[in-house]
Image (cartoon, rainbow, N blue to C red):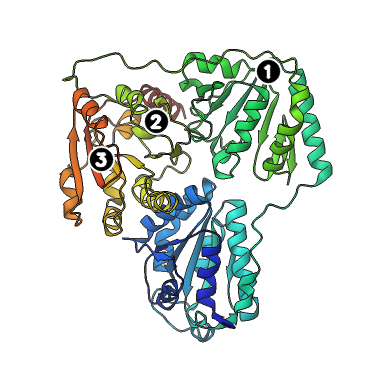
């Protein structure tokens, strides 16, 4: 094979970096490109219900496998996906967005084509994407096409941000030398400037040596930029107490003896709040300090000795070291920190949330009990998605088993996100280990935005657990403002009929409303094996919510009223 088409080259390259499922929808400007997917063994086209869901699914796949690929058509398709792409940009998720655009000849003639604005501007949608992409490329020169594709894939992976790649419809069948595939794409990070890295490491080590009450906090980018292993080694090497934020949930092994809980400012359990805020040194790995991730910016550290480790810079107190990447700095610290913590005497970490007290089987389910109990059902290696709303707050009360991967969207907070995201996570889980379980916790209101993607799950015989929290409307919004307002209400659905409506034949649809029903279900051996897709409707009181969400609602309403 001396020549390969441009379209096939793209998919061969994606397969080389372990991207095996492609998300998106067909459109006349990308159809010839989609043909090439089937020419590459081991690749599959998911075929989503709409572009927004496809972007959410690509996000979920990328969080598990490191990057993903979304394909849309020009104009109408790509714009429908941009909310999802913006979320991936905000939350550091590597999605390669490939767009089939009109042919080079059509563009040159400025033809009045469908899906355009009718003004001959064929670059307008590309320009829109530049604001939410790490980089973009529009292929126009075949001699540069391979290097552009390779660079887009590399940047997507190494920066963990979306990248836009436009390919004209007439170029998919243009050919390239097949030998280009023999040279792997360099997916490694470029080394830090040695002098800058030395200064950072030396400064941190001096701070560590002088600290008597240091802590480690793992945030979202600890997982996104793949430094969970380094963070755990740092905890082992130092024995410092370790905590996560809501967005960092799952970044630290919660059964580690030095794990102390979830820190979220004023919304934190008192013992965890005291342990973190009284520290004299804070090592913050991968911080994304959004409002809901910080209890509406209510972090109240007593110290200014704060080191923030980021993917592309390190911040020490008020000094920022641009271009110094945390992965290399953490590697250095793990090797060198031993001599600097010889005199450190480990302090006790806060005890975990106590187990639920025994209750009669007929006791109605409530949020606080449910989230505390959930850890007994979860298994090592599970993937747990929690939707914006009661789920995203409630999961902070759940103790994760080892190697549990948590997915939420605390920063971008697009309602319905997890309804599409769970599809991508389920595809990724299946590719890694068919026995790996994937759990979605989503409210009855949020589900209505992205429910169509359940049909795609059924189409591919994926087997996630779909837990629908039925509290009759948008409870999170009711807690913030308008508890009886019509705009916070929804039309009720028959959730147990959704799976067969979308064509499922081997499935379970279960409703639970009491503690006894939950315990019976979650201790059933057959239920604990992901042998089929399941819809579990959890009946909850309308205004019932986790205690931290109730507090957040009061805080948000008070702030809004004061502004």
> Mark 3 vs mark 2: which is more N-terminal?
2
Horizontal side, residue 423 vs residue 164: left or right? left
What residue is rendered at 52% in x and 81% in y?
171
Toward which corner of the image does residue 437 lie, by quadrant?
Answer: top left
Toward which corner of the image does residue 157 lie, by quadrant?
Answer: bottom right
The image's mark for residue 383 is none
Numbered disc 1: secondary structure: loop
Closer to us: mark 2 or mark 1?
2
User: Of residues 320 and 131, which is closer to you in this image?
Assistant: 320
* Vertical placement of residue 317 versus 29, above or below: above
Residue 390 place in picture, x, y as percent: 34, 32
What residue is rendered at 52% in x and 55% in y?
67
Residue 508 place in picture, x, y as percent: 19, 44
Horizontal side, residue 383 vs residue 215: left or right? left
> Mark 3 vs mark 1: which is more N-terminal?
1
Q: How far apart are marks 2 and 1 (CA)?
A: 29 Å
Horizontal side, residue 458 vs residue 331: left or right? left
Q: How far apart are marks 3 and 1 (CA)?
A: 44 Å
User: Of residues 68 and 523, which is closer to you in this image?
Assistant: 523
Closer to us: mark 3 or mark 2?
2
Report whether residue 123 is seen: no
Numbered disc 3: secondary structure: helix
Residue 458 place in picture, x, y as percent: 26, 55
Toward which corner of the image does residue 215 lie, by quadrant?
Answer: top right
Residue 254 place in picture, x, y as percent: 49, 27
The image's mark for residue 395 is 2
* Vertical placement of residue 91 versus 503, above or below: above
Horizontal side, residue 285 vs residue 359: left or right? right
Residue that carries the numbered disc 1 in the rendered image: 280
Residue that carries the numbered disc 3 in the rendered image: 444
Disc 1 crowd, CA 10 A, few/some/many (<14, 14-19, 20+): many
The reply to whether dot 2 and dot 1 touch (C-beta < 8 Å) is no
């Amino acid at each position: 094979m001396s020549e390969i088409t441009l379209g096939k080259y793209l998919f061969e390259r994606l397969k080389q970096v372990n991207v095996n499922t492609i998300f998106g929808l067909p459109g006349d400007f990308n159809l010839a490109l989609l043909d090439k997917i089937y020419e590459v063994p081991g690749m599959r086209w998911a075929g989503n219900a709409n572009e927004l869901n496809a972007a959410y699914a690509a996000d979920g796949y990328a969080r598990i496998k490191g990057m993903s690929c979304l394909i849309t058509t020009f104009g109408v398709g790509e714009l429908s996906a941009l909310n999802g792409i913006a979320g991936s940009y905000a939350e550091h998720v590597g999605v390669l967005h490939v767009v089939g655009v009109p042919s080079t000849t059509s563009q040159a003639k400025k033809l009045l084509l469908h899906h355009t604005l009718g003004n001959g501007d064929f670059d307008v949608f590309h320009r829109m994407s530049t604001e939410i992409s790490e980089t973009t490329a529009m292929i126009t020169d075949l001699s540069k096409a391979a290097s552009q594709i390779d660079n887009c894939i590399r940047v997507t992976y190494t920066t963990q941000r979306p990248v836009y790649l436009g390919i004209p419809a007439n170029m998919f069948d243009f050919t390239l030398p097949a030998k280009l595939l023999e040279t792997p794409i360099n997916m490694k990070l470029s080394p830090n400037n040695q002098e800058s890295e030395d200064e950072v490491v030396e400064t941190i080590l001096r701070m560590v040596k002088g600290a008597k009450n240091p802590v480690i906090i793992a945030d979202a980018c600890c997982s996104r930029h793949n430094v969970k292993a380094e963070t755990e080694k740092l905890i082992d090497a130092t024995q410092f107490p370790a905590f996560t934020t809501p967005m960092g949930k799952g970044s630290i092994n919660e059964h580690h003896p030095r794990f102390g809980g979830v820190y979220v400012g004023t919304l934190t359990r008192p013992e965890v709040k005291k342990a973190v805020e009284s520290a004299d040194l804070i090592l913050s790995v991968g911080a994304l300090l959004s409002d809901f991730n910080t209890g509406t910016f209510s972090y109240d550290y007593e110290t200014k000795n704060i080191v923030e480790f980021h993917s592309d810079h390190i911040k020490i107190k008020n000094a920022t070291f641009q271009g110094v990447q945390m992965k290399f700095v953490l590697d250095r610290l793990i090797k060198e920190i031993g001599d600097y913590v010889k005199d450190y005497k480990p302090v006790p970490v806060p005890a975990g949330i106590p187990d639920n007290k025994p209750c009669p089987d007929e006791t109605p389910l409530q949020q606080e009990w449910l989230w505390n109990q959930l850890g007994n059902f979860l298994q090592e290696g599970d993937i747990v998605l929690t939707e914006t709303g009661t789920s995203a707050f409630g999961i902070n009360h759940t103790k994760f088993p080892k190697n549990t991967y948590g997915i939420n969207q605390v920063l971008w907070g697009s309602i319905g996100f997890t309804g599409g995201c769970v599809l991508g996570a389920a595809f990724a889980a299946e590719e890694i280990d068919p026995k790996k379980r994937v759990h979605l916790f989503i409210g009855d209101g949020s589900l209505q935005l992205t429910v169509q993607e359940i049909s795609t799950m059924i189409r591919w015989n994926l087997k996630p657990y779909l837990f629908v929290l039925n509290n009759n409307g948008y409870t999170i919004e009711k807690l913030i403002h308008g508890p009886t307002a019509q705009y916070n209400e929804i039309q009720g659905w028959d959730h147990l009929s959704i799976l067969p409506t979308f064509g499922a034949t081997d499935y379970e649809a279960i409703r639970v409303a009491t503690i006894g029903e939950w315990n019976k279900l979650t201790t059933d051996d057959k239920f604990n094996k992901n042998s089929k897709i399941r819809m579990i409707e959890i009946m909850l009181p309308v205004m019932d919510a986790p205690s931290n969400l109730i507090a957040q609602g009061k805080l948000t309403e008070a702030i809004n009223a004061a502004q």
